[in-house]
Image (cartoon, rainbow, N blue to C red):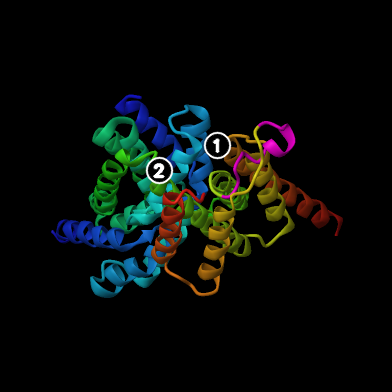
Amino acid sequence: MTFFGLFLLFFKIGVFTFGGGYAMIPLFFDELVTGRGLLTQPEFANLLSLAQMTPGPVGMNAATYAGFRQLGVWGAVAGTLGVMAPSLTLVLLVGIFMNRFQTNTYVRAVLDGIRPGTIGLVAAAVIFFAESSILRAPLQSLWTGEGKFGISLFGAAAFCFTFMVSKYLKWNILWIFLVTGSVGAALGYWGLI
Amino acid sequence: MKQFQRLWPLCWEFGKISAVTVGGGVAMIPLIEEAFVDKRKFLSEEEMLDVVAVTQSVPGIIAVNMAVLTGYRAAGIAGAFAAAAGAAVPPFAAIVLVAAFFAGLGGNRAVDGMFLGVRSAVTALIFLAAIKLYRQTIKTKFSFLVAVTAFVLLGIFRVDAVSVILGAGVVGVVWMLLCRRKQKESGGGQ
């Protein structure tokens, strides 16, 4: 991939992102994993996990990281600029014509459709992530019979743990990663997963 | 010039905010308010509410959108670019360091185990985010149907995300036109 190619790729992702970080995941997945085969599914999940752990917006981190993996520092520049460009052009225009934009009936109707649609995107992101953590094979293997379907016990346990401590105890995301990450590292080191 | 003097504060404050927000997006709102409404008084409370409302209804990364709009309101187009640059630098530096470090770590069993743990945790966090969004957004049968259809198309049939988003926008317009027609018909009968 060239610098300009990466820029365009992430520009496209930026243009179709509504509702922020998690809703971008299926877009990233289409472009980087299924579309161009730039990354494997576990690599993709690692990328997004790292993007969550580092400071700054998840979408931008993911673009920077994916760009770096392709072309080094220049790739990171292309990814970052590409994913920011829609905000700097489209959003700036909207900001300038703010009042007319917000009261337009058609703009509101389009958004009334897209907003619930982004929930579908976030829900689909749960499946993509589950396929590279809790599940041992893509969900489709249940009905296509390709690949052996199974569940990772450790993955499922870490999922339940995170769900509980995040929802009920309001644990900080970094503590959660510290616990699940170090238990995973220990189990992996002793060959238990 | 007043606007010119605001460029560096915009860049610096957004850099700080972006460096301390992990997870991104909406978590930045209170920090932006504190920096630009309370402390520096670049924006009024009302302008800030406008910025938040618009960032949710335009494409792009929420954090960058907020930087662009806040910067624009405070100091025009140059302000928008200054704020966006500030927001971009800390995550960029962090990621390049992390990426350079992790590039040589593939295939190690302990590292693979660590990532499996973190990935499972992220799955749960996204799941929680989906539930929260669902509660906030799904208020009508129409929005419920759109959300479920989008999910099935993406998650089960693996339709590409761009088509689903464009489709959802078109469905929104069609629905609006249908509602309008119905209103007219019932209005005409009276």
Residue at the image position 38 percent from the left and 31 percent from the top: A8
SS for callout 2: helix
Residue at the image position 67 percent from the left and 37 percent from the top: A140
Image height of B27 relative to B91, above or below? below
Q: Chain of mark 2?
A: A
Residue B113 numbered mark, or none:
none
**Residue A52 visible somewhere in the drawing:** yes
- Name the foreground residue: A135 vs A41: A135
Outermost residue toward the right in this view: B189
- Name the foreground residue: B20 vs B116: B116
Kindly identify which residue carries mark 1: B162
Residue A148 rendering spot, x and y as whole percentages: 66, 37
Image quarter hosting the N terminus of chain A: top left
Residue B134, picture quadrant: bottom right
Residue B49, picture quadrant: bottom left
- Which three-letter amino acid code belongs to the residue tagged 2? Leu
Q: Provide the residue span drawn in magenta.
A: A134-146
Residue A90 numbered mark, or none:
2
SS for callout 1: helix
Image height of B40 relative to A62, above or below? below
What is the distance, in whole Å, between disc 2 and disc 1 at their CAs?
A: 17 Å
